[in-house]
Image (spheres, rainbow, N blue to C red):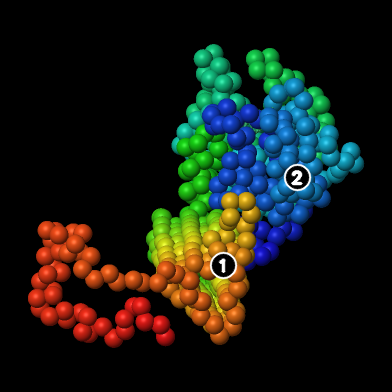
Amino acid sequence: MPRGRAGRVGAVPTHHPAAVIILAAGQGTRMKSKIPKVLHTIGGRSLVGHALHAARCLSPAQLAVVVRHERERVADHIAQIDPAATIADQDEQPGTGRACECGLEALPDDLTGTVLVTMGDVPLLEAQTLADLTRIHEEAGAAVTLLSAVVEDAGNYGRVVRDADGNLLQIMERKDAEEHRRLGNEFAHVLDITEYNSGIYAFDVEVLRSALRRIEPSPVTGEKYLTDVVKLARDEGRLVLAHPLRGPDLVQTEGVNDKAQLAELGRILNARNVERHMKSGVIVVDPATTWIDVDVSIGQDTVIRPHTQLLGATTVGEDAAIGPDTTLTDTSVGDGASVVRTQAEHAVIGPRATVGPFSYLRPGTVLDEAGKIGGFVETKNARIGAGAKVPHLTYCGDATIEEGANIGAGTIFANYDGVAKHHTHVGRHSFVGSDSVLIAPVDIGDGAYVAAGSTIEGVVEPGQIAVARGRQRNIDGWVARRRAGTRTADAADAARARGARHLDETTSTPTQES
Ligand code: UD1
Ligand code: CA
């Protein structure tokens, strides 16, 4: 597994399930969103992406995702992130049981062994937990093993009902438990049970298949409940188990139902990621304001300063310093580089290079070793060679700047003529004076100069200086004639009275050619 991947290395299991079925057909109305629930992201990965990732860590022979709501968008996304996954369509019949049945129907008929069922909206479930569930299930020779959780109040979850000896009897949905409470019958206590069904299971595939065939839809909701498999299997004398999670592991079973839960689970996932990096040797000054996506990798002794976001496939080498106030997306940063108050997307920052403060690196920016992009600089599709400097207040688009070149303050690479983009080339160790405009296409040779304030179009040969600006003209007496009576005129008079000191000390006159 590549460095920085979300799954734990310890998750490599000894028991490989025959299949994993991920249920993701539900509507998710409480999200109040135009985006299908399982496509919302935390840690830079979609909710269903998290479920797929955990499942894949177990190397199942088959993997199916059951879809229905926003079918096309969800299926397209899955095809993109996990092309080998089987898309299973749920029909009009609702319920987790029917969803699971549709998942099974999409898989080979001769499947034997263990099938895991998980949910597309439970993003923090770890591969290790699924591996443990598989092992416990197979070692016990159980027909059904479900992950349960013990809490103070089981809320809306299905209750885990056990007999006096602790043997699992059935799962009872909250609504049914409330009805039994109202009737005051032998199940009246079920509502108070604090162990709930997480909705994550290991099944023997033959037991599951036969039970699903026999489940009747609920007369109230019309849904086929997957949970009914527990009671059916037990009534046949098969072994059914509930494996409880406790304490901090409970969060692994939490689903996303609304945007508040999305943010909360996103925060927990981030804390997990940040801690993982700190344990592998990254210095994180302020974990609470540092956001690191699941696929990011960071080398040892790199310092991450407050309010920094490292997103997407960003990689950072060793001994680098990032932040404060920096957002890097799909950006690679070399060893020992420094990136301060910067926004970068699809950029490459070489070893020992420095960037910022207040700079914007757009896609295609490549800064080579020990190069510099300084303050208030925007770059795009620009290669800046080793040791080259773009230190201040510059727009640099569609350019190649060779090794050791220096771009003066306020230089603009005018790359766009209103119709097409053009390229600018600046040769090795060349020097572009401040406040120049390079109207692309421009080709400045190696070892050339551009005089400050020049507007350059075309070619400058190696060893030349290009001077392209209006010549300075000084007009004597202009202030006295045109601005008489102003403070400026008074100051000029006073200066003249002191003996025209400035003129005497000037070493070269502006109109003189050299
Ligand atoms: C289900 C369990 C409940 C458990 C809870 C844990 C049943 C009957 N109840 O309840 O015991 O405590 O999960 O969260 O199973 N889905 C489909 N197709 C459907 C319906 C649902 O694919 O027709 C998917 C949803 O997208 C979701 C998952 O199944 O990922 C769970 O569905 P949901 O409706 O949230 O089940 P609950 O009623 O919460
Ligand atoms: Ca739910």
The kind of residue tagged 2 is: Ala
Q: Which mark is residue 78?
A: none
Q: Can residue 242 be seen in the rendering of this structure?
A: no
Q: Can residue 309 be seen in the rendering of this structure?
A: yes
Work out whether 14 lies above or below 281: above
User: Circle 1 is placed at which residue position?
Assistant: 457
The kind of residue tagged 1 is: Glu
Residue 253 screen position, x and y as percent: 57, 42
Residue 307 screen position, x and y as percent: 41, 57
Residue displayed at 72% across by 52% down: 56
Q: How far is the residue under mark 1 from the one under mark 2?
A: 48 Å
Work out whether 463 lies above or below 27: below
State the image quarter where residue 410 is shown: bottom left
Q: Which of marks 1 and 2 is in front?
A: 1
Dot 1 or dot 2, earlier in sequence? 2
Residue displayed at 43% across by 73% down: 452
State the image quarter where residue 57 is shown: bottom right
Q: Is mark 1 on a helix, strand or loop?
A: strand
User: Circle 2 is placed at which residue position?
Assistant: 79
Residue displayed at 31% across by 81% down: 509
Q: Nearer the viewer, residue 467 or 265?
A: 467
Quadrant position of the C terminus in the picture = bottom left
Work out whether 67 lies above or below 473: above
Query: Could you tell whether 508 is left or right of 351 in the image?
Result: left
Residue 146 screen position, x and y as percent: 66, 40
